[in-house]
Image (tube, grey):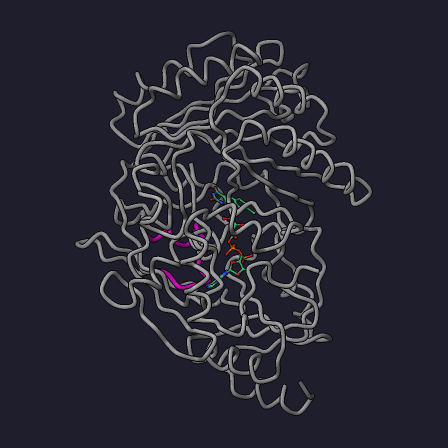
Amino acid sequence: MTRDNLRAFGDQLRGDLIRPGDAEYDDARAVWNGMIDRLPAAIARCAGTDDVLATVAYARDNALPLTVRGGGHNVSGSAVSDDGVVIDLSRMDAVHVDAARRRVVAGGGATIGDVDRVAQEFGLAVPLGLVSKTGIAGLTLGGGLGWLRRAYGASCDNLVAADVVTATGERLHASETENPELLWGLRGGGGGLGVVTSFEFRAYPVPPQVSFALVFHPWHDAKAALQHYREWADTAPDDVSSFAILWHAPAIDEIPGEYHHQPVVVYAAVHCGDRAEARSDLSPLRDFGNPIADLSDAVPYAEVQQLFDEDYPAHIMRYYWKSLYLTGLDDAALETMRSLNEISPSPHSTLDVWQLGGAFCRVAPDESAFGDRSAPFLLGIEANWEDPADDEANIAWARRVHEAMSRFSTGAEYLNFPGFFEDGEQSLLRKSVGANYARLSDLKGKYDPQGLFALRGGFS
Ligand SMILES: Cc1cc2nc3c(=O)[nH]c(=O)nc-3n(C[C@H](O)[C@H](O)[C@H](O)COP(=O)(O)OP(=O)(O)OC[C@H]3O[C@@H](n4cnc5c(N)ncnc54)[C@H](O)[C@@H]3O)c2cc1C
C-alpha cells in the first residue's frame, strides 16, 4: 500500500474512504465492545456492491488484511484489524418487503432494528436476535437466535438467498437453485466465504402485540426457581421462546430497593401466538413462587425487540462472551451456575440459559452449515463490566464458568459468542459446526483459496 495507490483507490469509490487523521476516523473504527481499540489503515464505507468489489480487489492486490463490518457487534471485534482494510457496510442498510411472498431483502449493513421497523409495517417479522442494534450479517452468518427461534427457527434457517462478492471478485447469487452449496455454507457457517451484500429472508406474520413475560425471583429461591424452569421448559409449546437468567437485579423502580444489585433468577419469555393461549402457556412462569417483580406485559413486537437495548451500551462497556450447549439442566448443573453467579465480579454479567427445541431443533445437522441442533439448552456466558482495571477478573470469571460447566455440555459452542477466538478460529469453528467442518472447509477452499476473509478478523 502506498499513499498514491490508496488515494487512487479512494477516488474510485462512490462511498467514503476514511483514513487515520480524518475527522471521522475514531468513530468509524470503534466497534460495540469498548475493549476493542484497533487502528485500521483504511475504512471503505461502501455505497454499493461496486465499492465492495473495488475494496476486495485493493486489499487482495496489496496483500492487506481485510475485515468486513456488518453491525460491528461481534464481541471479539472481528470487524476491524490493526493496519488492515475494513469494508464498512453501514450505508448498505436498505430493507425491502415483498408482503405477498412474505420475503424481506436487507442490505449487508442493516441492523435488526432496520429490518424489524420495515417488516412490522406489513405485520411481518424475520426471526433475528434480541438487541436491535446488532447487525443482521454477522448474526445470520453465525446462526441467529432470538424470540422467534422455537416458533420459526434461527435466522440462518430463514435465509433463502444472498448476494455475495467473493475473494476473487466474482458476484454470485446463492439460493436453493443457484450456487446452493454456497447458500448452505452461509447458513450458520460463520461467514468467511465472501462479502454478503444482501440477504433475503422468509418472514412470518406476528400479532400487533406479543406476550412478554419478565419475572424476577429472589436469590434464596434460586434453586427452586431454576428447577421449576427446567420442568416447565420441557413441555412449553413452540410459540414460546424463553430464558432463565442468573443475574444481579438492576436498580429500577419496579424492583424493591433491598434487591438492587443482589443476585436474582429471571424468567424471560416471548409468546408469539394467540393472546389467550399465551396467558395460559406463560402462567406457570408468572404464578410460580414469590417473585420480587413481575414486569410481564403485552408489547408491540418491534418494542420487545428493543427491551434489552439499554443493557448493552456501545463503546463504553467492556464485554467478553462465551457459550456451551448443555445436555440438560440437572441439579448439579444448576448448582454450579448458582454458585458462579454469586461470585461474578460485575453486577452487569449474566448466565443466560437459552431454551432451544421447537422449530430450531427440527433442522437436520447437515441441512445447513450450522450443525447439530439436539441440545435442549444453550448457556450464554456474558461478562459485562465498565472499568478497564477489572478486565482480568471478569475474563477470568467467564473462563471459570466455561470450564466448570463444560462437564454438562455437549462439547459444542455457539459461533456468535466466540470470546476472543483465543483457542484459534478453526478450533471454535470445528466445535460449532461439528461434522460439517470438512464440507465447510471445502467451500472455503473453493471461494476463498487464499484465506482473504478470516472469521476472527483482526484480533491479535
Ligand atoms: C448486544 C448484543 C446482542 C446480541 N444478541 C444476540 C442474539 O440475541 N442472538 C444471537 O444469536 N446473537 C446475538 N449476539 C451476537 C451476534 O450475533 C454476533 O456478535 C454477530 O457477529 C453480530 O453481527 P454484526 O454484523 O453486528 O457483527 P460484525 O462485528 O460487524 O461482524 C462480525 C463478523 O461477521 C462477518 N461479517 C459481518 N458482516 C458481513 C457480511 N456482510 N458479509 C460477510 N461477512 C460479514 C465478518 O467476518 C465479521 O468479522 C449479540 C451481540 C451483541 C453485541
The residue located at (30%, 23%) in the rendering is: 278
Q: Find out whether residue 110 is within the magenta segment.
A: yes
Q: Is residue 77 above or below residue 416?
A: below
Q: Residue visible at 42% across and 16% down? A: 285
152 vs 418, left or right, is: left
- Give the farthest residue toward the left: 100
Residue farthest to the right, as pictured: 389
Whether residue 383 is situated above or below residue 264 in the rendered picture:
below
| Vertical order, 366 against 446 (above or below) | above
What is the total number of numbered labels drawn onto the structure image? 0
Residue found 63% across the figure and 77% down from its top: 64
Q: Foreground: 354 or 306?
A: 354
> Image check: 344 left or right of 407?
right
Decide whether residue 450 is among the magenta residues: no
Nearer the observer, 442 or 289: 442
Q: Quarter of the image containing the C terminus?
A: bottom right
Viewer-nearest residue: 165 or 441 = 441
Q: Locate residue 233: give its quadrant.
A: top left
Whole-percent x, y for residue 199 in the image? 36, 61
Q: Quadrant of residue 105?
A: bottom left
**Quadrant assignment for the N terminus:** bottom right
Q: Where does the image place residue 368, in percent across and percent down from the top left?
A: 35, 51
Q: Quadrant of residue 231?
A: top left
* Front residue of 27 and 339: 339
Q: Which residues are magenta?
A: 106-118
Q: Position of residue 307 (x, y in %)?
A: 49, 36
Q: Residue 394: image x %, image y %? A: 73, 37
